[in-house]
Image: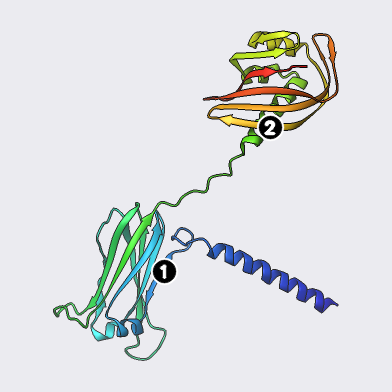
């Protein structure tokens, strides 16, 4: 039984690891977390003396190029790569790694590191030859076409119109129940108007009404929200034990309409209808 449980745990671990690997591999590597790698072996150059590669890199992303080398032949790579546009990418280092083999003349590798600076396109060129002889068709060369891009930052998921409208109404009733007048005054537009069974109110009159509001337990339901530009219209039903202007309001669900307008300082309550 213990072996069976262990097997199940291992299978679950492998499943989760595979899922995470797929999720990570699905996102293009642009050199931010791990360098973009370009590697060309001696066998590759034996097949084709002049190789061209293309890569995409993020601004501030890193590119690493690793090439076959054999100093014992008198051939050597250029220390500094030829870069067509230094405002797009810049070489940061060049290193040589000896061969792991003890055999005389065994090939080694050389590496160059680059960093993306600004969005754009450029080319990196590296040549492998003998410095004391003229260039030959047998010499090796590598050209890397580089595109540096600005990575798009993922925007946080925006709330839907219904979520925004319902949230604004719920916040209003929360402040009215706790008589948080300062919060309410900050939320009410100067152009506010309302209509109740006792008549119409402007901003100051509505605030006075709220001061004398005795709002008991309530329930909000049946939200419907529409938006046109900076105007949000919310209709809903409320079931509440409420005393308004000294009159107890029916506890059965009744319809309400509340309107908000978006300003530089956020959404403001600008109109309200309480027909019952």
* Disc 2 to disc 1, C-alpha distance: 54 Å
Q: Quadrant of residue 43?
A: bottom left
Quadrant for the N terminus, please.
bottom right
- Location of mark 2 (residue): 224
Q: Position of residue 194 (x, y in %)?
A: 67, 14
Report crowding for label 1: few under 14, some 14 to 19, many 20 or more residues within 10 A (C-alpha).
some
Colouring: rainbow
Q: Is residue 231 left or right of residue 100?
A: right
Q: Residue at x 33, y 91 (%)?
A: 104
Residues 188 and 252: in front is 252
Q: Secondary structure at mark 2?
A: strand
Report crowding for label 2: few under 14, some 14 to 19, many 20 or more residues within 10 A (C-alpha).
some
The answer to whether residue 246 is above or below residue 111 is above
The answer to whether residue 32 is above or below residue 157 is below
Q: Residue at x 36, y 70 (%)?
A: 65
Quadrant for the C terminus, please.
top right
Q: Position of residue 253 (x, y in %)?
A: 81, 25
- Location of mark 1 (residue): 37
Q: Position of residue 145 (x, y in %)?
A: 31, 65
Q: Position of residue 71 (x, y in %)?
A: 28, 82
Residues 230 and 138: in front is 230
Q: Is residue 254 left or right of residue 201?
A: right
């Amino acid at each position: 039984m213990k072996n069976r449980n262990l097997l199940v745990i291992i299978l679950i671990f492998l499943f989760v690891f595979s899922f995470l690997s797929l999720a990570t591999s699905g996102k293009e590597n642009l050199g931010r977390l791990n360098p973009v790698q370009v590697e060309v072996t001696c066998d590759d150059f034996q097949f084709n003396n002049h190789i061209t590669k293309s890569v995409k890199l993020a601004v501030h992303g890193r590119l690493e190029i690793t090439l076959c080398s054999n100093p014992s032949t008198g051939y050597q790579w250029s220390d500094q790569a030829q870069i067509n546009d230094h405002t797009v990418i810049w070489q940061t280092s060049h290193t040589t790694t000896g061969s792991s083999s003890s055999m005389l003349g065994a090939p080694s590798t050389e590496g160059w590191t680059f960093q993306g600076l600004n969005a754009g396109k450029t080319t990196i060129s590296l040549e492998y030859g003998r410095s004391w002889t003229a260039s030959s068709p047998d010499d090796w060369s590598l050209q890397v076409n580089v595109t540096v891009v600005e990575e798009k930052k993922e925007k946080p998921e925006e709330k839907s119109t219904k979520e925004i409208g319902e949230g604004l109404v719920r916040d209003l009733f929360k402040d009215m129940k706790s008589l948080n007048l300062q919060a309410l005054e900050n939320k009410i537009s100067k152009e506010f108007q309302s209509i109740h069974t006792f008549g119409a109110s402007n901003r100051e009159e509505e605030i006075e009404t709220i001061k004398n509001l005795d709002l008991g337990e309530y329930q909000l339901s049946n939200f419907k929200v529409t938006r046109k530009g900076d105007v949000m219209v919310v209709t809903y039903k409320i079931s509440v034990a409420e005393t308004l202007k000294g009159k107890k309001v029916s506890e059965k669900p009744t319809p309400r309409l509340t309107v908000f307008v978006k300003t530089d300082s956020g959404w403001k309550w600008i109109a309200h209808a309480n027909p019952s």
